[in-house]
Amino acid sequence: MRMRLKSPLFALFVTAGPAFAQPSILPDRDVEVEYSARGMTAAPTGVPEQAIARFDARSGRVRVDPVDGQFYAIVDIAAGQMTMVMPEWRLYMVQPADRDIMAMFQESRTALRRIGAEMIAGVPCVLYDAIVNDRTGQVCLTEDGVLLRARINDPERRRDLQAIRVTYAPQAAAYFRPPPGFMRVDANGLPPGAIQGFMGGGPRRRYPPGRYER
């Protein structure tokens, strides 16, 4: 059972097709970015979603925390793996990272063309026209690889992501691995609907049948 990360950050980190000169899309120093996003879900609420992304330059790992706190995701770029951590249940699962997420880090699959410059959240960035899974859009990247804005034109809905706070600071290694004492669960061994139960929040109930290990 594959679990797709419905996160404002990664929903826009999708690139395809060789084309123009390629800047870095992975920060080369530790940074924490808070994002506001619209259009990440189909529900037409118009209410911005928010998420905090942390980047560890040494390990090349990215952690994304939606503000609701029900789960967070750690992507190991080198290993091509994504770890979903569910604090309420003290569980985590490891699976291959979504190929669309990984595509953004592959230079040969990214199409960007520089068109200008902007200042976002007090930080300068270079504005690019982009091709994202055959859809047009724009991204704004700092010279050290931090994504500050992405606007993707989708036939079903427009997707917008923008940084509202950028903090350059060392990130603790513990952010990028499951907490001690959490059990690893094999998502393939869980009954239908179990993952949705884990992600639904509320008081913790008894674990559903499945394969668990410490």
Image (cartoon, grey):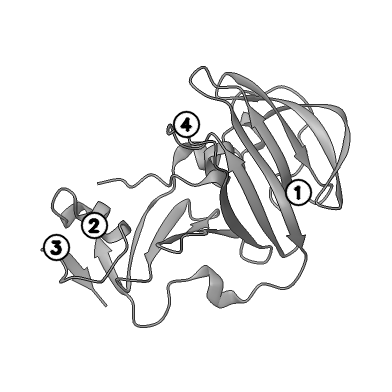
Query: Does any portion of residue 172 appear in the rendered image?
Result: yes
In the rendering, at what x and y percent does residue 23 appear?
Answer: 78, 39
Q: CA distance from mark 3 to mark 2?
A: 13 Å
Residue 99 vertical position relative to residue 142 in the rendered view, above or below: above
Which amino acid is tagged 1? Gly
Which amino acid is tagged 2? Gly
Q: Name the residue nearer the viewer: 57 or 6.
A: 6
Q: Residue at x 13, y 64 (%)?
A: 208
Q: CA distance from mark 4 to mark 1?
A: 31 Å
Q: Earlier in the sequence, mark 3 or mark 1?
A: 1
What's the mark number on residue 44? 4
Q: Mark 4 and 1 residues: CB-CB less than 8 Å, in contact?
A: no
Q: Name the residue nearer the viewer: 70 or 24.
A: 70
Tag in front: 4 or 3:
4
What's the mark number on residue 145? 1
Which amino acid is tagged 3? Gly
Q: Which residue is mark 3?
A: 210
- Residue density around tag 1, few if under 14, some if 14–19, many if 20 or more, within 10 Å: some
Q: Mark 4 and 2 residues: CB-CB less than 8 Å, in contact?
A: no
- Residue density around tag 2, few if under 14, some if 14–19, many if 20 or more, within 10 Å: some
Q: Mark 4 and 3 residues: CB-CB less than 8 Å, in contact?
A: no
> With 108 as the anchor, is 120 left or right in this view?
right
Q: Secondary structure at mark 3?
A: loop
Q: CA distance from mark 1 to mark 2?
A: 36 Å
Q: Name the residue nearer the viewer: 113 or 117.
A: 117
Q: Secondary structure at mark 1?
A: loop
Tag in front: 4 or 2:
4
